[in-house]
Image: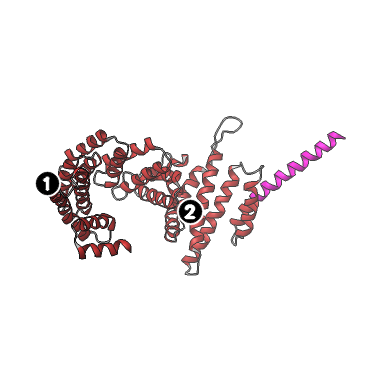
Amino acid sequence: MKKIVFSVVLLLAAGFVFAQEKAVKEAKKIVNGTSPDFAKAEELINGALTNPETKDLAETWNVAGLIQRKRSEKEMEKAYLRQPYDTMQVYNSALNMCKYFFKCDELAQIPNEKGKIKNKYRKPNSSEILAERGNLINGGIQYFNQDKNKEALEFFGTYVDMLNQPMFADNEQVKNDTLMPQIAYYASLAAMKMEDYPSVLKYAPYAKDDKEVGKYAMEFVSTALKAEGDTAKWVISLQEGVQKYPDHPFFFGNLIDYYSNSKKFDEAMKFTDEMLAKDPNNAFNLYVKGYIYHNMEDYDNALKYYKKTIEIDPTYAEAYSNIGLIYCLQAQNFSEKASSDVNDPKYKEDQAALKGFYEQAKPYYEKARELKPDQKDLWLNGLYRVYYNLQMGPEYEEIEKLMNN
């Protein structure tokens, strides 16, 4: 009796497998017809894609991709006949077709029971994918402009993923694609907007050599590494960024901040001197050197390099602000030693010296305000302190109102 029951189970299983394989064939027949019912074909293939008996068959995924290709062709036929057509359907079909054909190729590369690989799908499917690549870009742009970054990333990322697909390993068209860095950049930009840092690190490196967006792609990599807490790789990425894009201040500025905050002033100074050796009149590099001395509390050298900065670039508001700050810090340090006894013969002398520091700070803070009136952090607190100590009534009242607001 047990043997009979077991045989019945085997027959049922075989029948179910046959039914799923039949569904795949039926779906293929439907889409190859003159008036394909895509809804029915997709219903049949979706069942086969998840069924344990057919989901690991290359033909199942090949038919799934075929359905998407046929759907796209039908919409483009409408466009050719000047009939209303669904643009997004064309884009989404291109994306889904690529995904299905990628999976088909992966399964077709598995050796058979004799250890041989017979992949009859690779050549035709790779041609179909290459023909649809433009729609991956168009779909990505469409979603990106709608601020649908998840969808945009999927389109742009699928385009870039072709570089690592075995079916395109020897394809010169993919390997030498001049659009690839730009698409990789937009994939990483969409990922950045979602703070999807693993995707940033996956796609941004493909764009790092691009003349237009390479520096931003490398900036994304650094930002992602920092966000993930990988300090060692973050520092290395900043160093690489400085070497590759020395004119992009993001890398140099963040690297110097890291050295300064970590009290690694010798390393910071060494790196800055190397940059100045290459470009002695670079205002940003001069400013950074002043900034390092500033953090070391070597105020004389800090002033020297901040002033060199504004000689090169008279519009460098941050340098003016920091010069004002140093004079105020010097005033504070001096006041701690100055006589506070009005009967002390040194009192007037010390007060005059103290006033001198604030008088020196005043024009620099005012210049910072003139250059960047909306960036109040550069001058508001400084001028409040200067005007107060110089007893400048109207000016002090005006600043006080700004402070209160």
Measuring 22% from the left and 49% from the top, which residue is drawn there? 325
Name the amino acid type tagged 2. Lys
Instruction: Say which label, 1 or 2, has the lower sequence index.
Output: 2
Name the amino acid type tagged 1. Pro
Specify the segment rendered in magenta: 1-24
23 part of magenta stretch: yes
Residue 200 vs residue 163, the one in the foreground: 200
Q: Regarding mark 2 in the picture, which secondary structure is present there?
A: helix
Q: What residue is shown with label 2?
A: 150
Specify whether residue 46 is in view.
Answer: yes
Residue 345: which numbered mark, if any?
A: 1
Residue 6 occupies which quadrant of the picture?
A: top right
Residue 144 occupies which quadrant of the picture?
A: bottom left
Measuring 48% from the left and 44% from the top, which residue is drawn there? 123
Q: Position of residue 224 (x, y in %)?
A: 40, 44
Q: Quadrant of the C terminus?
A: bottom left
**Magenta region, main secondary structure:** helix
Residue 73 vs residue 157, the one in the foreground: 157
